[in-house]
């Protein structure tokens, strides 16, 4: 596992931050933001898959933007109560050291997701013939659709999803008295479930949910060790960018 900030007095930065924000309403913020996210996902399912790649890209951008708005909206009261974005949710500016941290943890994430996929293929043979990507229909994507997808997946989604899941929800569960490890597992499960519907079949959805859940779990560890969201956002952005590049390459092979 890549190195990160060293625990002081037996506590990692996130543990100390959680103890320092005892009076902020994280539970209410997490419930509201998750409810808004679920509503957005249900709306996407209800709308279905538009025929045009550009329309699908606009839908993706709109969904990620709504989730981002919900995450920011519930964060504002926490920021006011705790004295800043860094104290409230771990969000701060870029540091030069983030390049090394992000690169190392991105490599660890790739290894983790490949291991999960490999184990699933071993124990569930039918998965060998499943297309599990949530990025489909790119063979004839317009230039507009490509730009919109990059903005949605590489710019907005990493910020909104890390702010929601690792900035708010993880802190909310730890403040209930839950230890970090069960809180991180729960975080990964929720994160995975929010992506299951993106699979084109039930089996594909299961693989996508497990893979994304493992990704969320590792992101929790990164945030715990650094106490910050910036490296996690960087890992998330690079992961989504790589997924887009692979999907484009596969669509045009």
Image: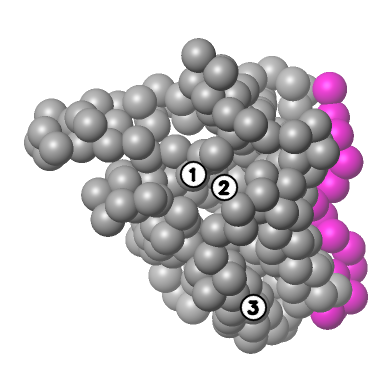
Of residues 178 and 237, the one drawn nearer to the viewer in this rendering: 237
Of residues 54 and 29, the one drawn nearer to the viewer in this rendering: 54
Q: Is residue 35 left or right of residue 160?
A: left
Which residue is painted at 44% across and 46% down in the image? Answer: 212
Q: Which residue is mark 3?
A: 36
Q: How would you rate the neighbour count of disc 3 (Cα within 10 Å): few for under 14, some for 14-19, many for 20 or more?
A: some
Q: How would you rate the neighbour count of disc 1 (Cα within 10 Å): few for under 14, some for 14-19, many for 20 or more?
A: some
153 is higher (above) or lower (below) than 41 = above
| Visible residue check, residue 79 | yes
Which residue is painted at 38% across and 50% down in the image? Answer: 200
Q: Find the distance from the CA under tag 1 to the CA under tag 2.
A: 28 Å
Pointers 2 and 3 in contact (CB under 8 A)? no
Q: Quadrant of residue 86?
A: bottom right
* Pair 1/2: label in front: 1
Regarding mark 1 in the picture, which secondary structure is present there? loop
Residue interval drawn in magenta: 77-96
Of residues 37 and 167, the one drawn nearer to the viewer in this rendering: 37
Give the label on residue 134, or none.
1
Mark earlier in primary sequence (1, 2):
1
Is 138 a magenta residue?
no
Q: Which residue is mark 2?
A: 224
* Pair 2/3: label in front: 3
Regarding mark 2 in the picture, which secondary structure is present there? helix
| Visible residue check, residue 215 | no
Pointers 3 and 1 in contact (CB under 8 A)? no
Mark earlier in primary sequence (2, 3):
3
Residue 148 coordinates in the image, percent (x, y): 78, 43
Which residue is painted at 23% across and 31% down in the image? Answer: 129
Q: Is residue 124 left or right of residue 147?
A: left
Mark earlier in primary sequence (3, 1):
3
């Amino acid at each position: 596992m890549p190195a990160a900030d060293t625990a002081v007095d037996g506590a990692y930065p996130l543990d100390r931050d959680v103890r320092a924000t005892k009076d902020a309403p994280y539970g209410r913020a997490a419930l509201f933001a998750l409810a808004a996210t679920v509503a957005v996902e249900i709306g996407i399912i209800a709308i279905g898959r538009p025929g045009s790649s550009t329309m699908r890209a606009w839908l993706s951008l709109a969904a990620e933007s709504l989730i981002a708005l919900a995450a920011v909206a519930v964060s504002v009261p926490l920021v006011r109560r705790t004295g800043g974005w860094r104290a409230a949710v771990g969000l701060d500016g870029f540091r030069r050291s983030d390049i090394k941290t992000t690169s190392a943890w991105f490599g660890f994430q790739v290894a983790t997701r490949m291991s999960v996929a490999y184990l699933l293929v071993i124990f569930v043979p039918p998965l060998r013939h499943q297309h599990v990507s949530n990025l489909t229909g790119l063979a004839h994507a317009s230039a507009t659709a490509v730009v919109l997808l990059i903005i949605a997946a590489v710019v907005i989604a990493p910020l909104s999803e890390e702010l929601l899941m690792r900035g708010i929800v993880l802190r909310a569960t730890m403040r209930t008295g839950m230890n970090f490890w069960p809180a991180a597992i729960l975080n990964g499960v929720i994160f995975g479930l929010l992506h299951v519907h993106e699979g084109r079949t039930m089996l594909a959805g299961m693989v996508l949910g497990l893979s994304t859940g493992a990704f969320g779990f590792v992101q929790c560890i990164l945030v715990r060790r650094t106490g910050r969201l910036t490296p996690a956002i960087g890992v998330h952005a690079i992961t989504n960018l790589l997924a887009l590049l692979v999907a484009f390459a596969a669509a045009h092979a």
